[in-house]
Image: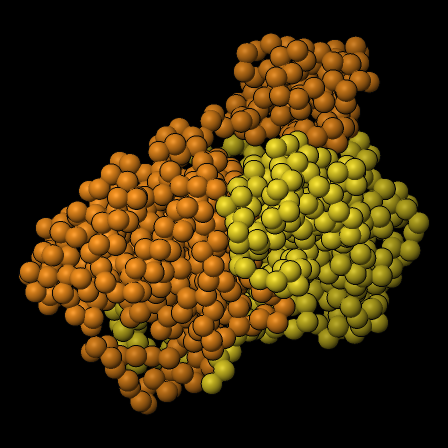
Chain colours: A yellow, B orange
Amino acid sequence: MNPNTNPPGGTRDFLASDLRKRRAVVKIIQEVYESFGFEPLETPAFENLSTLLGKYGDEGDQLLFRILLRGEKLQEAMREANSKEQTANGKKLYNLSDLALRYDLTVPLARVMARYAGQLPKFYKRYQIQPVWRADRPAKGRFREFMQCDLDVCGSSSLTVETEVLAAACTVMARLQFKDFSILLNHREVLRGLIEAAGIAAELEGTALVAVDKWDKIGKAGVAEELVQRGIALSSAQKLLALLEEANALNDNAARLQYLRQKMKRPAALKGLDDLQTVLQLSEATGNANRLSLAPNRARGLSYYTGAIFEIVVPGVSGSLGGGGRYDNLIGMFAGKNIPACGFSLGLERILLLLEERGWFTETNAAIDILFMNFPENLPEILSLATRARHAGLVCDVYPEAANLKAQFNYAAARQVRYVAFFGQREQEMGKLRLKDQGNGNETSISTSELENALKRFLVPGMESSL
Amino acid sequence: MNPNTNPPGGTRDFLASDLRKRRAVVKIIQEVYESFGFEPLETPAFENLSTLLGKYGDEGDQLLFRILLRGEKLQEAMREANSKEQTANGKKLYNLSDLALRYDLTVPLARVMARYAGQLPKFYKRYQIQPVWRADRPAKGRFREFMQCDLDVCGSSSLTVETEVLAAACTVMARLQFKDFSILLNHREVLRGLIEAAGIAAELEGTALVAVDKWDKIGKAGVAEELVQRGIALSSAQKLLALLEEANALNDNAARLQYLRQKMKRPAALKGLDDLQTVLQLSEATGNANRLSLAPNRARGLSYYTGAIFEIVVPGVSGSLGGGGRYDNLIGMFAGKNIPACGFSLGLERILLLLEERGWFTETNAAIDILFMNFPENLPEILSLATRARHAGLVCDVYPEAANLKAQFNYAAARQVRYVAFFGQREQEMGKLRLKDQGNGNETSISTSELENALKRFLVPGMESSL
């Protein structure tokens, strides 16, 4: 019987070569987030089920990984499940779980805001880079365990926040050498104003937004059809789409702002335009205004946005690499009051895929600086040399067993070793360590008495060749 | 209604100050592990239930966090649970789960060894630093979510492996400035030999080991009592304890080796002594022999050890900070063959507690280098200066709102800011940024045109005062 040794569907094992890439990207994201004054936060992998239930809609509730009750509590719950049955949508409901895996990083942040209210600064700027879990049907590029890289500012309604959050996102993208990205910018109230201007009733606004949100996937005609299916008059649907398309077709942000300003009457919508204009102006100061592009047809499905909405896109890549916006009514859900908030989440998995495609990951550097070959008669001396080399800052491995050189070289190749080091009888007699460059085959000998000084040159980039 | 905003029992939220400490320690562990040529590995938070069940004994099975089946599979499982009942130990058994949270890092490693056999090097040296979850009763210092820091070498029986694994553990402890640690060393076959020498039957060996393992907690008399309760003749129990105590009482490793060699006859036990002697000798070469102390009464409960056993201890601290050993029959469980292995796990949570007690964490460095105060009339210029300062490598925050200076200083204090920066009307007229050191109150002005050069001095330790 061969046991199944695959990781569970939708999850992945990360071996060293993958992990080095992931860590390189996460390190950059983290450095940028911290440079903007964001503090790290980590929360437990699971939350009380009651913390998560009802926060992500019915579909989200279905996608939670729930943890089974344990011990006597499970026995009791099963007795109860048998005695009184509850059903919903024709399915039986059971209360067999007390905990569930984290589904996103926003609800935990809301819980943290309530729990530690007294000890957090007036503006809580936090980033959180941790996995989340969703019981989605696994598919190519869709995982059940994946990383989120969130950054949020809680506690301020100032547009400085939007500006800084956008600047952080732009800086990450620039550090990752995306030369062609842009951030699409919209505003919930602007969308609302356009829907009103198209003659769509306020109560159909939510459903209209869901349809508009699909523009990227199903195109204008598809959205029109969907709007009508959702009970919106054809004439209104056509008017809305014309407004969006005309605005989008204009050359620059200034022209789009001017166009939209003429088309809407709602004070809140005009205020939304003012806000976007301010964010664009302040972004001149951060050097990112040229990355921002007004896109009135972007809705970002999540209905919780209350102000600016943003989405990172790269030409030729469908979907977004991340997004966010202002959501002033969510973070206070556990604190029992409104807490303004604005944030951003990067789609690490998509970014990694794209970086890979674009050859961003240079030839993985050798994992091991020096592999010391095993000469059993000199093993103590070899271990001592390896110890000194490690103290000098080098990554060293020692071939653990007595074996012929062929086997040892095979291992060196499998481990991506820069140099193999020989300290056999001849080298010992001469008091020298012989190093062979695995890249070009060159050999050098260094005096063991000056090992540290000689090896330190390894650490200076560009000096290896003169070793 | 006040929702419960605590993290689930036995889990913790890590705010920035905690997280910085944890990350500082993990970084050192990771650097040391990598310097020995260990590669990183990460596996999913959950495994298929069948991967984990039966691997940790009955108690371990009870402590697994199982994930509830979803959708139709749950409905089906509940129908089945009602129709045919299984019981064990008077409790009903239910098959309601397909996945369970990772309980340790060793079983996932065994799965990885089988799954990726073809692509891993002949000796797989991996480290893994990830959380594990156990449904233990939460208590002070006992968590349901905690980090493990494992390092293992798979594929070699050479004692070079033990030597290098011990050297890595010693190096971590030294880097963490534990001046007083030692690693207790024992060998499964030596314990077995002593048990035989005491006249205890081979089939009672396992139960005798469990009793001996409690020496640290219940003392010699307690162990004697427990041995008798476990069916061992009083005379044999006394003989075993006398052997262990006499060996332990000897001054040094050489004397203990000599003593033990005289007391045992089993060839495997004598071979075990030879192995320990070799490890001690090779550890002279790595500079760690003086940290190693033979301790024949250490059994490390886990019965899976087959060779050397080690345990890190610190005087005055009960229990261990980590431990490991050789276990040649475990890692091959999914591969269907024996794969020799030897490794080590550090108890991060205990190490963190101890470092905290010992004042290892120096005054947390300021989280923010510069907080730019908000002067609304100059906001674009301020954002531009902050952007330039970040490019120069500094961590900067901008107070997001218009507010009086008192409120802004309060925030500066809450965020642990090194300098606050003023760019109001006066500073703008002079073209200077005024910086106030939050530590000593000193003020300096730097010309905005030379911002980068002036700020770079921040980055050179010891240069701050001459800014």
Q: Residue at x 21, y 66 (%)?
A: B205
Q: Position of residue B290 (x, y in %)?
A: 38, 38
Horizontally, residue B231 falls left or right of residue B276, namely: left
Q: Quick check: can you spot residue B118?
A: yes
Q: Residue at x 28, y 49 (%)?
A: B257
Q: Position of residue B280 (x, y in %)?
A: 39, 46
Vertical side of B63 occupied by A38: above or below: above
Residue at the outermost left position: B234
Horizontally, residue A343 falls left or right of residue A377, namely: right
Vertical side of B230 occupied by A428: above or below: above
Q: Quick check: can you spot residue A132?
A: no
Q: Report the front residue among B430 and B175.
A: B175
Q: Report the front residue among A82 and B193.
A: B193
Tell me where residue B418 sits by quadrant: top right
Vertical side of A206 occupied by B4: above or below: above
Q: Position of residue B318 (x, y in %)?
A: 26, 42
